[in-house]
Structures are given as structure tokens and as C-alpha cells.
Amino acid sequence: MRVYACIDDIEKVARSRLDANAENYYSSGAVDETTLALNRSDYGRILLRPRVLRNVTSVTTSTTILGRQVASPIAIAPAAMQGLAHSDGELGTAKAAKNTASLMILSTYSNTSLEDVISATPDLPQASESPFWLQLYVHQDRCISEGLLKRAEKAGYQALVLTVDAPVLGRRLKDLRNKFSMPPHLKLANFDASQGVMTASERNSTGATSGAKADASLTWKDIDWLRSVTSMKIVLKGIMTHEDALLACQWKVDAIIVSNHGGRQLDTCPSTISILPEITAAVKSYSHAHPTLPVPEVYMDGGIRRGTDVVKALALGARAVFIGRPMLWGLVVGGHEGVEQVLQILNDELRNAMALVGVQSVDEIGEGCIIRKSLL
Amino acid sequence: MRVYACIDDIEKVARSRLDANAENYYSSGAVDETTLALNRSDYGRILLRPRVLRNVTSVTTSTTILGRQVASPIAIAPAAMQGLAHSDGELGTAKAAKNTASLMILSTYSNTSLEDVISATPDLPQASESPFWLQLYVHQDRCISEGLLKRAEKAGYQALVLTVDAPVLGRRLKDLRNKFSMPPHLKLANFDASQGVMTASERNSTGATSGAKADASLTWKDIDWLRSVTSMKIVLKGIMTHEDALLACQWKVDAIIVSNHGGRQLDTCPSTISILPEITAAVKSYSHAHPTLPVPEVYMDGGIRRGTDVVKALALGARAVFIGRPMLWGLVVGGHEGVEQVLQILNDELRNAMALVGVQSVDEIGEGCIIRKSLL
Amino acid sequence: MRVYACIDDIEKVARSRLDANAENYYSSGAVDETTLALNRSDYGRILLRPRVLRNVTSVTTSTTILGRQVASPIAIAPAAMQGLAHSDGELGTAKAAKNTASLMILSTYSNTSLEDVISATPDLPQASESPFWLQLYVHQDRCISEGLLKRAEKAGYQALVLTVDAPVLGRRLKDLRNKFSMPPHLKLANFDASQGVMTASERNSTGATSGAKADASLTWKDIDWLRSVTSMKIVLKGIMTHEDALLACQWKVDAIIVSNHGGRQLDTCPSTISILPEITAAVKSYSHAHPTLPVPEVYMDGGIRRGTDVVKALALGARAVFIGRPMLWGLVVGGHEGVEQVLQILNDELRNAMALVGVQSVDEIGEGCIIRKSLL
Amino acid sequence: MRVYACIDDIEKVARSRLDANAENYYSSGAVDETTLALNRSDYGRILLRPRVLRNVTSVTTSTTILGRQVASPIAIAPAAMQGLAHSDGELGTAKAAKNTASLMILSTYSNTSLEDVISATPDLPQASESPFWLQLYVHQDRCISEGLLKRAEKAGYQALVLTVDAPVLGRRLKDLRNKFSMPPHLKLANFDASQGVMTASERNSTGATSGAKADASLTWKDIDWLRSVTSMKIVLKGIMTHEDALLACQWKVDAIIVSNHGGRQLDTCPSTISILPEITAAVKSYSHAHPTLPVPEVYMDGGIRRGTDVVKALALGARAVFIGRPMLWGLVVGGHEGVEQVLQILNDELRNAMALVGVQSVDEIGEGCIIRKSLL
Ligand SMILES: Cc1cc2nc3c(=O)[nH]c(=O)nc-3n(C[C@H](O)[C@H](O)[C@H](O)COP(=O)(O)O)c2cc1C
Ligand SMILES: Cc1cc2nc3c(=O)[nH]c(=O)nc-3n(C[C@H](O)[C@H](O)[C@H](O)COP(=O)(O)O)c2cc1C
Ligand SMILES: Cc1cc2nc3c(=O)[nH]c(=O)nc-3n(C[C@H](O)[C@H](O)[C@H](O)COP(=O)(O)O)c2cc1C
Ligand SMILES: Cc1cc2nc3c(=O)[nH]c(=O)nc-3n(C[C@H](O)[C@H](O)[C@H](O)COP(=O)(O)O)c2cc1C
């Protein structure tokens, strides 16, 4: 496939190839897309400090996430309905994850069943032990969710990622105007028709503000319920305040993802990179107060488009970062190869930035690598 | 009628339908429209903090305003000459207020008489007890104003809203250039011709900087005069400084509206949302110093276009917010149904934002829900 | 003549009527025109605080400048070669000054002699005692300057305004590109050909960076020389630092004008409105330290285009403000009537802003009328 | 040749004359060109303070750099492959340096050999003793670098400038898209083909992220190696942190250049002008702690396009500034005469700015000449 210079070049081509329905669904944020824009622009308020005359002959991005070795801290975020991007859908993404030894989170609302995703491409010569996690929206009928979790655990998913920022659906104006709906040739492959599950898009197309079947009554104590029905690790996706980060510590989840759902939920909430410091500080303070207790790992997503963005997120305390739309654009332009190229560009840029910042491993990336712009 | 995705979509259609004379009169602000723009853009400097894993199954916007139950803290601001927007004029707006159980303030300069407005549509099956208030500009001939107040009280208005930010008329350049004047088929229905009342527009068209008959000598002590001629509650509209907020406390008015007249009076005065904190702080400090005295309720208007704007205003201490132009645009595109759709969109967006901020009632909205951007 | 809504409307028409040579000469600032832009935009960082329920039936702008009564604190700055604007040149400007009872400073480089300017239109019925001052660039041949001062004093000028910000000429790129020069039908009417005086424009056209005959060696002690040759009051134009403001106090000049020459000299120096506070503070501190000594009055110019700008300058301690380009644009569109309309618009806007800020006289305008934006 | 009004005018013409390959190579910065833009825009955050009534009849820019007298603190940065700009290539630049008595740094990757550059134009009547320095990228095969240094010393170069900000090559997207490579008629004249040296562009065209032969293992201790093979003075180019400035003091280098390689290496690193204060402060603190030790001189480059930029850099503690692209644009439009005009414009602007700031020599330029904008 064609070689691109950067993620933006891939995005441009991808968006021009999609029909308006899909392009709008993938690209849009809530309401005025203020948060969507901040997610990107706030990286510009953090500057990198180049250190010189350090040996940077062997820069490596490898790290561990929840104890598993991965080739890079750059991982794949859950995104619904990847069948809109490419006929391979989630199979393409999974193949790319395996080929690059990257972590992938599968969305509840995938067009490929969770079993097919994990068992796909087993004969890839270069297939690694890349970790797979399943993202979960809890159904009002808890039995449906329990069934899903049992299947996931059996299929080999190592963690469940509970998305907590969508008790009701964000107002995405383009989808409201388009009356967006999933094309008939696709299905929500993790459910059968009888379960009455509606995708975000289906709910959108009804103009409903809350998910018809999503459980808006979910609270912290339901983490105990989750633990009672699965032994997978528990990751909370969508933490945006220090208060909730502390609650996550107290409820002993394994990890949290600082995320605002790619700016698709509450418009005018802060960018994730601007909030990351308050989250990592809260977790650190909890850890100091409870030195014997394990604390959640902290990841983030939102607006990651450059290797330098990753350095900044890591410098502010994230252990890993997830990419949503870039992965989708890669899928559009080249199926699994497109996703691989996206990951390769980002990892090349990351290594380049690490060398110029003067570090050889991700552990060396810290606050000393950055200046926050208001300090200038 | 057609279903719109947001207020801006309605505004766009409405403005394209009006002739330049009316479009300019409704849309314009004073001089360079700096304050008009700030009224809108300053909401962007306040960010919302999403709290998660809270039960948000039953979000409600209902509240009380001056002791009366209303369906929502979003109410209708007084705007002159609604006959320019739609043949129904103020009758349409009043019908929408009743149908949505919202508070409405009628302008002194309405094209429908105050009696007709309140008695309109009495047979609406869903007509609620929505409160009606009358906005007042004091005439140099006080007898004329006294007459108006007596009629309003008799007709059932529960409060008089004294507009204090217009002792002289703001310089709206487009109106000066257009020599804007009210079309001959409309009348100022609360006055008869002999009373020599000139509308803002009429004064504008003479190029006069002060209202020919508006009383620029009005001072705080005239509140005692108002109390002597009416038993309606007294609301001051146009408070923009902590000093005047304290004076309002001392003069024991029932409520104040933080307002800069939608940016139509003094250009380069601050946005209302940026000043709101200093006002609520002043009222709170007065209340602490005089624990046994009642203090005015605080409302605001200016630039409210999104449900998230409402959350921010409430978080900074407003009890209610008023919409001016959005109501006018609704009236243009669909008469009373248009105004209802405007209110419905804003209330839907408000409920959506409340759920994502993690609150179920307006009382729970507080400073903890927001970040002011300079803190980031 | 046609009635305009604001200064910008007049500017637009005026600039379209001039040839590029003159338009560029009048409009341009030094190099990148950074300071020119700041002179205007920094007013936007100061906001006005509307006070309400104050009697504003009789707002007046009248004040005194160096002890003389004037109708308004808005006065006319010296600008060279007004013959480029209109065939009446400086005679038109002088007539407007008289008709509006405004102070006018005549430029050294006028196309009308200083005697003609002051004696012009003596039979105007409404001619007031408006003060006239003469602006001075000191010639390397001091005799030439002495001659000019004697003539000025005799003609009735009450003050000499020494421009101190132009020991060398600012680099105005458009003039350099145009090789701007004064058209042959105009003359520098205060000099005869033998005196070898070159205008800014003539120097420009030679590409010289310093005025061929302007005296770049002028220092503070030359103020004593000036005092020895004239009894007119002494005003320094172009003070931009607190250090020089203090020196002006020590050298006992009668007044200073905070000015950066309309952004035409040192590009990227601060706007005048942003520096005004440090100047008035310095003069105040000198006054407190020397309570028995007189201190200079403080004026300013640069970017005044709105009545609200004047309120802000007065709130920050200026006693008067001068307008340069607005006067030139008025002259272009309507000769003396154009300048009068410019002054009338600004004074109307000033009165309007004063009423809405809640003051009736310029003495009441103080720091309490404004908010500096970083405080918001 | 044609006379230009400013550097930007020369840049515009030059860029329009080059083919895309060369234009992109010269103009581009890394990735999003954020740092490239900051290098320029951050000068706008520093304002100049005009002092008045000072004798400025004889302003001079002359100074010393590493003990050698130069006509101006404005010097020529090393830039690879000047043969792309003009057939004279580095010979033109060297001639301009001599004609203007300016310091020039020759790039390792010149299209003219270092011997030819320094011996060129020996018969210029006005040829002065302008200093020449050689910039160095250390080769993995140290013998190649040692050879180069011996030749440079013999040819008369007075300092070697070790570029430390490019252990790997920055990602310049346009070059990646163009697959930029050096045209076949040019050669890297300091090397013979057998030495396997690849230019930045050649490495770029392979898409490699690190220089094939550049030594990424270079560390501070290699400064001792450099000293062991040459007696030229040692200058480090690319210092951007106070930590590395202190290390440079400890390793006793003769000078450092605050540089981010014209925004071509690590994107989103700070502008040089914003970092300069932390560097000069670090060197000063080292000097105070070690009063008997010599400390490095501090220079800077990046975004210098105006005389006022030079004043700002000197005010913040730089002893000299280097120009990269402006020199290249000059070379394109007029060979050596173009470079001379570039230097002349900048020096004219510098003298102009000095006079208006009120200083006659570069030593008088200090912190008192500027305001940093956040202070306003
Ligand atoms: C089209 C689309 C669909 C998404 N679907 C889901 C989903 O099903 N579940 C979920 O937790 N997050 C979902 N997300 C949010 C992503 O997981 C992630 O938080 C976000 O995309 C990160 O921001 P980025 O796109 O700027 O990288 C979706 C995002 C997009 C753009
Ligand atoms: C066309 C128009 C007419 C108005 N007429 C009045 C009026 O008669 N009396 C009054 O107190 N305020 C009047 N206002 C101000 C509004 O009550 C309100 O303060 C303002 O519109 C709120 O800002 P918004 O338009 O951004 O919502 C008017 C506003 C507009 C736009
Ligand atoms: C075309 C032009 C000519 C000027 N000539 C003079 C002059 O001869 N002497 C002087 O002291 N200032 C001169 N000035 C500066 C003005 O007196 C004044 O400082 C400046 O115009 C104020 O800024 P403004 O144009 O934004 O109002 C001139 C300004 C302009 C625009
Ligand atoms: C086309 C080009 C080639 C360059 N080549 C080199 C080089 O070979 N060695 C080096 O140390 N710096 C090199 N630089 C960086 C310059 O020395 C200098 O740091 C930079 O251009 C200064 O910024 P300015 O272009 O904004 O003046 C190069 C810069 C450009 C634009």
C-alpha cells in the first residue's frame, strides 16, 4: 500500500473515501466539538525539552500494560462498528494488533463477534501474544451483560473495560442531522436480535438522549457485581476528575483510562491531556497514603496524532495511550495494513521524539521532559 | 414543523428569512459587538467536569423562581416588537411559555397589549400556571408608568422587571445605518398614540442617544416609589457590578438579573457569565452579614445557546437563565411551535449535560461541576 | 455632507478615495505594524463597568487642558502634510477645532504656515477660544528652530509640543516600497527652501534611517535651552516609560503625551493604553514625594476610535486624548465638516458611554469604571 | 540588484524562484512546524521600551565574538547544500561575510570544500578579517571527523561548532512526501565518495529516522576527544535547557548556541527566544559560583527576521545571533549581493531600533530595554 508521511495525511484520504453518513459518525464530536478540538490543541500548550549529548543509539518503546509485555505504549481504543470503515472490520484491526504486538480493546458494538476477533488470523507467522480486552456497556438486563462477560473470558480476553462516560448518549449534531443509522448489511455481532440492543447510532437516529437499554443507574457498587461474575481485570474508561480517580482507587479497579470519549459525550469538558496531571497526582497521593495497596495503572486517550503527543502523555504520568480515530482512518485506507501503518508512523515518531528528548526507554520519560506553556 | 438539531441551526434559518431591517435589529449589538461576542465566547472559558458512576436515571430540570414552580430554569427574556418575527408576535411566545410551563417576561414595547398576552390561549388543554412578568422602562411622565403597572397587576403579572441598563440607548451601528424603524402595520400596544412613547427603534431612527421620553434621572430611591404604586414583586434587570448587587440587597428588591442587554447597550462591558461570580459572591456576603434578611434571587441572561451554558450559569450561582434572541429565532421559524422547539432543545441539552455531569436535579449543580479555564 | 455611523465607516471611505501614495503614508505603521495593531486591540483588554440607577440626565464632556477650558478631552494630534488629505489642508482642521471648541496641535511639517492656520476663519460666528499648540522637531541648526518658536509665540500658540520619539525615522515599509514623496504642488509652509528641511517623507524616499537635519543629539538638558528661547508651555510627546515620565517631572515640563507616534516609529513597542498606567503611577508617585511641586498633566494618543476608548484612557489617568488618523480621514471625506463629524461622533459616543458607565462628568471617571481583562 | 524593503520581501521572491524540492527543503520545519512558527511568533511576546532624549547621533553595532572584532552581532548560521540556492553556493555566502565583516559558520554538508570557501575571493579590496567557523556532525567513523578537523584548522577556521541537536534526523513532512534528494550536479564537497557520508536529505529520502552514519552515541565526554584532536575553539550548537547549559559550563566549552535547528528537529520544543533567559541565567549562576573560571559565550538563532528581534535577543543575554534561512533567501535572489543586502537590511533595522530604544552600542542593550508580554 501507499506510504504516508503522517496520520493527518491518512485521515484526509480516509475521510474523502467514506460516505457522509460514516464519515460524520466517525469524525464528529458532541455539540460544538469544543472538547474534540481541545483534545488536539492542548498538546500545543505542552512543550518538549530536548536534552543533548546522550547516547541514543538504541531507543526502545517496549513496556508492560497490566503486567503484559507490549511493543509500545500506543494501543488501540474501542470503536463501534468498524465494518463501516472496511469490509474486514474488526478482523483487520485485530490482525494489525497482532502483527505489531499491540494491545487492542474491542468495542461491545463490534460488527464481528468477540470470538471471531480473537481467533482470527491464528496462522499469522508473526502473530504475537498481543493482549485483547473487551469494552463493556452494561445492559439494563444484567443477564445479557453477564453472558457477554462469560463469553469474553472464555475467548481469552484479559480485561473488561467498563465505559463510564456514557450513561446517556452525547449529542452529535451531524448524526442528528443525518439521522445516522447502521447500514443493513452490518450487524452488532455480539448480540442476537432478540436482545433489543441498540447501537449508539440507532439511538441517535431516534433522537433519544439516553440509551434505550443502557443502564444509567450504574454506580460504583456495581463494580462488586462485575467482580462477582468475571475474573477478568477491570478497567474504567472515562475518568475525568480527581474525585473519581480516588474512588477508582478505593474500589480497587486495575486500571483507569482518562478519556472523554474522543469529545463525543459532554461538550466543553476539558481535554484529556489537560486533566491527566490531576488524575495521576490523585492516584499518587492515594498510593502514598496506602503504601501497601496496589493502585490502578493510568492510561489516556483523546487526540493522540503525533509521537510527541505520546511523550507528553507519558511525561504527565500515563502508562499507555489509546488511539481511536487514527485506527479507523488506517482501516479505511488499507484494512489491516492501514492500521499497521498508522501504528508504525506513530511508533517511528515516538522513537524519534524520544531520541531528541534524550531518552532511550519509556521509563525515562518524566516531568523533566516537558514545559507547560503557561510557565513560559 | 421541521425538527432542528440545535439553536444555531434555527438561528441560521430565521436570519435568512427576515428582511435586513428586522434581522439587523434583532441580531445586532452595540458598536463593535465586542460584548455581544464575549457573551457567547466566555462560556468557552468554563469547562464542565464529568462525574461518573452515579445513578442518572431520572434527571429533572424543575425548580422554583420567586416561589413559583417552573418546569425549567430556562425562561424567556423580554424583547421588544415580536411582531417583526411572526404575525402571532407575543401571543406565540406566550403560548409556548404556557405549553412548556416556562416563565415569560413581556417587554414594555410589545406589539400585543399586556392584557391580550396573558389572556391568550386560555383554552389550551396543556396550559399550565406558567408565571408572567412585565418588563418596565420608566416614562418621564410617571403617570404613564403607574397606569401600566396597575393594568399589569390586574391582568395577573406577578413581577415587574425594571430594566436599569438603558437610561440612554446603546449605539447599534446597523440600526443607525439602516435608519431602522418599526413597520407601520405594527403598534406599541401597551400605549396609545397620545402618550408619545417612542420605541428604541424610533429613537434610533432619530439618531438620538437618549430615549426621548425614558427617564434618565431614575435612581435607587425610585424603588420606593415603585413599591408605593404596585404590590408586584420587583426585579432589577441589568446589574453588572458587585457594588450595584449590594445596593440591590440594601434596597430589598426581590431578584436581580445579571444582564448587559444582550450586548446591545455598553459595548466592551464584560460578558454576563464572567461577571456572574462577583455578583453571586456579593449577594452571599450580604446574606452572611444579614442572616435574618431575605436576599434577592440572582438570574442571568446573555448568550445562552446550549444546555451546557445553563449548567455553567447555575454552577456559578444563577437560579435561572433567560433567552432573548433564541426565542426570537424560534418565533420566526415556527411561531409558538418554534419557540417551543427552542425551549425543548435547550431543555434536552440541559438534561443531557446534567446526566453527564452526574447530577439529577438543578440543586446539585455547583462550583464543583466546573473548571474556570485560567486554572488549567 | 453624508452622515456616518462611526469612525470606521469614515476611514473606509477616506482610504478608498486617496491614491496609494497618500493612503499608505497616512495609514501605515513601522515594519510589521505590530504596535499599530496593539494600539487598537489593547483597548479590548480593558472592560467597562456599567453602574446603574444613577441620574445621568446631564452628561458633560467639558474639561480643562493646561488651564484652558475645552468642550471635550478629545483633541487633535499633529499630523504632517494635511494637504494630501484635502485642498483645505490644515485650514480645514483648524476650522473644525474652532467650531467644536477643541484643542489642536499643528505639525511642524504643515502645508499651511502656522500664522495662516491660527488666523484662519476669524469671522466664524461660532469660533471659540479653542487652544492651538505647535509641534516641534528640533533642527540641527538651532537658529531655524528658534525662529519657528518666536513666530509661534507671536501668532498665539500657547504651547510647544516637542516630539521626542523620532530622533531617527521609523521604517514604514510601504513608504519604502512606494518611495513616497510629497507631491510638488505642496510645500512645507513653515520653512523656506533655503533651510534644507526635509519632511519625514522626503527622508523616507532617500532611504535614510535618520532625519537628515533632525537633531538626534537632543537630550533632557535642551529643555533648558527651549525655556530660554520661548515662554510657551512645554509638552513632551512620545513618553513611553516610567523612567522618562519621572525625568519629565524632574525637568518640570508642563505636560507629557504618552504616544508611540501612532505605531510609526519603533515597531513592537507596547501600545500606549497598556503603558499609560505605569506613566500615571510614576507621575503620581513623584507628586506624593514632592507635594509642593507642580507635576505635568498626562495625555495620550494612539488608536482612539471609539468613545469607550476615551473612557478607558481617562479611567487610567489621562486628562486628554489626541486623535491622529481619524482626523485625517475626516478631512479626506469632508474637509472641515468631515473633521467636525469625526469629533462629533466621538463625543456622542463618549457621552453615551459615560451615561452607561453612570457618570455625568469626566472627573468622575476613574479606575472603578474599568476591569483589566487579565483579572477576569 | 533590486533594493528590498525587508527580509520578508526577499523571502517571498526567493521562494517563488526555487523548485518545490529545494523550496520545501529550505523552508520546512519538523512535523507540524509548531516550533518553526513559535520561533517567529514568540518575538511578538517581547516588547521594546523606547527611551527618549538621549544622544543617538553615533549608533554602532560592532562587537567581539570569541575575542574577534566583528561589524555586527548578526552572523551567518551553518546551512547545508547552498548550491541549491545559487550557482555560487557557499562561495557567495563567504564573499558576503567578508564584504560585511561578519562571522560565518560553514556547514559540514557544504557543496564547496572548506578550503575553497575560506580561500575564495582573497583579492576583494574590502575583504576584512571576518571569522570563519566550521560546523561538525561527528561521523560513526571518528577518523573521518578527525581528518575534517585537521583540514579546517589548517585552512584557518577558528572554531568548530558541534551540532548536538541532531543525533537522529527530524521528521520534515514535506521532504518525506517529496522524497527529497540532492540534485546530481551537486556534491558534498568536504567528503569523497568512499566515506559513505549521507546528507540529511539523503537520509530523509530513505525514510530513515536516524542518520546512517551520524554518531548517535556521542556524549559529553567526547568533548575531551575533540580537544585532543584540534586546538580550534569549541562551540556547542543546539542547547535548549538550563541543565545542558550548566553541563556546557562544566565541560568548559568556549560558547553555546541556543538553537532548535530552525524548528527542523524536535517539533513542539520551545522557541529559542523563550528559552534564552533560562540559559543565560544558568550561565550567570555558574559564573557567580565559579568567579575565577571562564564561562561560555551565549549566542542564539531561530526566527531572526527583524532588527528588533536582535535587540530582544541581546537584551535577554545573547552576545550574537545567527541567521539561517534569511541568508539562503538572499543567496537565491542575488548571490553574494543578496546575502549582503540581507545583512544590510538587518543591520540598518538594528541601528534604527537601537536609536529608538535610546542606546548607541550593543553593550547598553539589557533587560531594561524590554517588557515580556505576560507582564502587561
Ligand atoms: C467512531 C467512534 C466510535 C467509538 N465507539 C466507542 C465504543 O463503542 N465504546 C467506547 O468505550 N468508546 C468508543 N469510542 C471512544 C474511543 O474509545 C476513544 O475514547 C476515542 O476515540 C479517543 O479519541 P481519539 O479518537 O481522538 O483517538 C468511539 C470513538 C469513535 C470515534
Ligand atoms: C431584539 C431585542 C429586543 C430587546 N428588547 C428588550 C426590551 O424591550 N426590554 C429589555 O429589558 N430587554 C430587551 N432586550 C434584552 C433581552 O431582554 C435580553 O437581555 C438579551 O436578549 C439576552 O441576551 P441573548 O439575546 O443573547 O439571549 C432585547 C433584546 C433583543 C435582542
Ligand atoms: C500621517 C501621520 C503624520 C504624522 N505626523 C506627525 C508629526 O508631524 N509630528 C508628530 O509629532 N506626530 C505625527 N504623527 C503622530 C500623531 O501625532 C499621533 O501621535 C498618532 O497619529 C496617534 O495615533 P492615531 O493615528 O492612532 O490616532 C503623525 C501621524 C500620522 C498618522
Ligand atoms: C536548509 C537548512 C539547512 C541547515 N543545515 C544545517 C547544518 O547543516 N548544520 C547545522 O548545524 N544546522 C543547520 N541548519 C540549522 C541552522 O544552522 C540554524 O540553526 C537555523 O536555520 C536558524 O533558524 P532560522 O532559519 O530561522 O534563522 C540548517 C537550516 C536550514 C534552514
Image (cartoon, coloured by chain):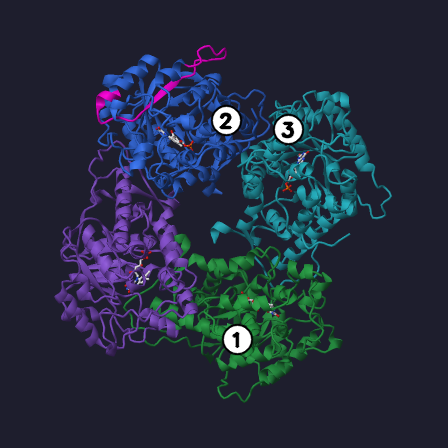
Chain colours: A green, B cyan, C blue, D purple
Does mark 3 have its CB less than 8 Å from ligand 2? no
User: Mark 1 and mark 2, same subunit?
Assistant: no
Q: Which residue is mark 1?
A: A338
Residue B124 horizontal/vertical position (percent) = 85, 45
Q: Secondary structure at mark 3?
A: helix
User: Mark 3 and mark 1, same subunit?
Assistant: no
Q: Are marks 3 and 2 in contact (CB under 8 Å)?
A: no
**C132 inside magenta stretch:** yes
Q: Main secondary structure of the magenta part?
A: loop
In the image, taking residue C168 as reference, residue B113 lies left or right, namely right
Q: CA distance from mark 3 to mark 2?
A: 19 Å
Tell which subunit mark 2 falls on.
C
Q: Which mark is residue B204?
A: 3
Q: Secondary structure at mark 2?
A: helix
User: Mark 3 and mark 2, same subunit?
Assistant: no
**D83 inside magenta stretch:** no
Q: CA distance from mark 1 to mark 2?
A: 64 Å
Residue toward you, B104 or C213: C213
How crowded is the residue under tag 1: few (<14 C-alpha within 10 Å), some, or many (20+)?
A: many
Residue C231 in view in this figure:
no
Up/down of C191 relative to D212, above or below: above
- Residue bounds of the magenta highlight: C120-145
Q: Secondary structure at mark 1?
A: helix
Which of pointers 3 and 2 indicates the residue nearer the eye?
2
Residue C72 horizontal/vertical position (percent) = 47, 21
Up/down of B201 relative to C270, above or below: above
Q: Amino acid at mark 3?
A: Asn
